[in-house]
Image (spheres, helix red, strand yellow):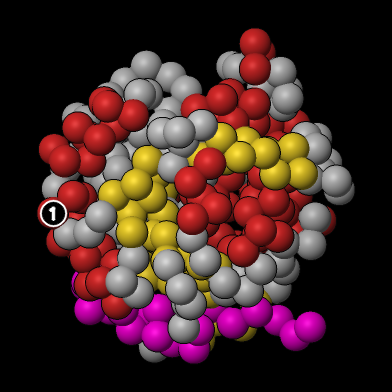
Amino acid sequence: MGKAKVYFTREITPQAMVRMYEAMGVDLPGKVAVKLHSGEVGNQNFLRPDFMKPAVERVKGTIVECNTAYEGARNTTEAHKNTMKLHGWTDIAPVDILDEDGELELAIPEGLKIKKNFVGDRMKNYDSMLVLSHFKGHPMGGFGGALKNISIGLASSYGKAYIHGVGDTDNFWNSDHDSFLESMADACKSIVDYFGDKIVFINVMKNMSVDCDCCAVAEDPAMGDIGILASTDPVALDQACLDLVYASDDPGRDHLLERIESRNGVHTVEAAEKLGIGGREYELVEI
């Protein structure tokens, strides 16, 4: 296996999203799930439907999400559907809350911390997946990118608590931090194993607040936008995004890096590489 290719453009437009998908040279087969972030009600930084629409339409995709495990406007299917409608996602494509009917258990025999992952049961209705991630900081993970979007993002409400608690759903917020990051990597492994070569990833480095799109009250971005990246390897993709932040001379860079480093954010990428999900070495192909 050679180094993964990570495609990069500085152009941040809906049309560039389609070009980045096409750059990967993969045509996703069958019924395509498009995983993105619906945005918590009140959040100002999440990427809007009009930005994502051409990419979703390019694969004739269904937008998929899972319910949250904490209070907010996305913690029940009814509330989550209302949020999807409020934010305009239902105007651009069909929307499916994957854990509406329950969950599907995926085994992770080689997991570092958890040996099973709980995802939305309806994931089994899809043949392939396009993962559209908004790269930014995160209160717990340090940063959110492709790996977080398929781990916490695709976990059912119970599954989210299971990952956060490193297998103990009663210990949601108080688990050992690095073990939580490794559990996220374990969950990623189950998703990548499930879809095989029928899953691809695009990260958008725009509106890069230190806070996640899951925060109803989020800080405004301190750092300027960088671009769009795409890869069939989520480990290489997230690493490339981190490297671009480090390489930036933007004055707001240090604020984002403080968030990433204080939460040991890179450890999720390290653990994912250890599990064989992908590699941290890559070839950056600028488009």
Q: Is residue 19 magenta?
A: yes
Asked whether, in this view, residue 239 is left or right of residue 45, the answer is: right
Which quadrant of the figure contains the N terminus?
Answer: bottom right
Residue 113: quadrant of the picture: top right
Q: Secondary structure at mark 1?
A: helix
Report whether 267 appears left or right of 93: right
Q: Is residue 91 left or right of residue 268?
A: left
Compared with residue 272, is residue 129 higher up or lower down, i.e. above or below? below
- In the image, is residue 12 above or below residue 223? below
Q: Can you name the residue that lies furthest to the top here?
A: 170
Q: Residue at x 72, y 26 (%)?
A: 166
Q: Measured from the top left, where is residue 81 in percent x and y?
A: 25, 35
Viewport quadrant of the C terminus: bottom left
112 shown above or below 29: above
For residue 186, side relative to residue 274 (left or right): left
Whether residue 232 appears in magenta in the rendering, the answer is: no
In the figure, 20 relative to 151: above or below? below
Query: Is residue 221 or residue 5 the one in the foreground?
Result: 5
Instruction: Please report the residue visible at 46 percent of the width from the left and 73 percent of the height from the top.
Output: 30
| Nearest the eye: 33 or 229 | 33
> In this view of the protein, can residue 16 be seen by the observer?
yes
Q: Is residue 223 visible?
A: no
The location of residue 110, given as percent across then percent down, is 86, 48
Magenta stretch: give its range: 1-26
Place of residue 135 in the rendered image (x, y in percent of width and height, measured from the top left): 42, 54
Please tell me which residue is depicted at 40% across the width and 78% down the height of the picture: 21
Q: Which residue is mark 1?
A: 91
- Residue in view at x 70 percent, y 60 percent: 193
Amino acid at pointer 1: Asp
Image quarter of residue 197: bottom right
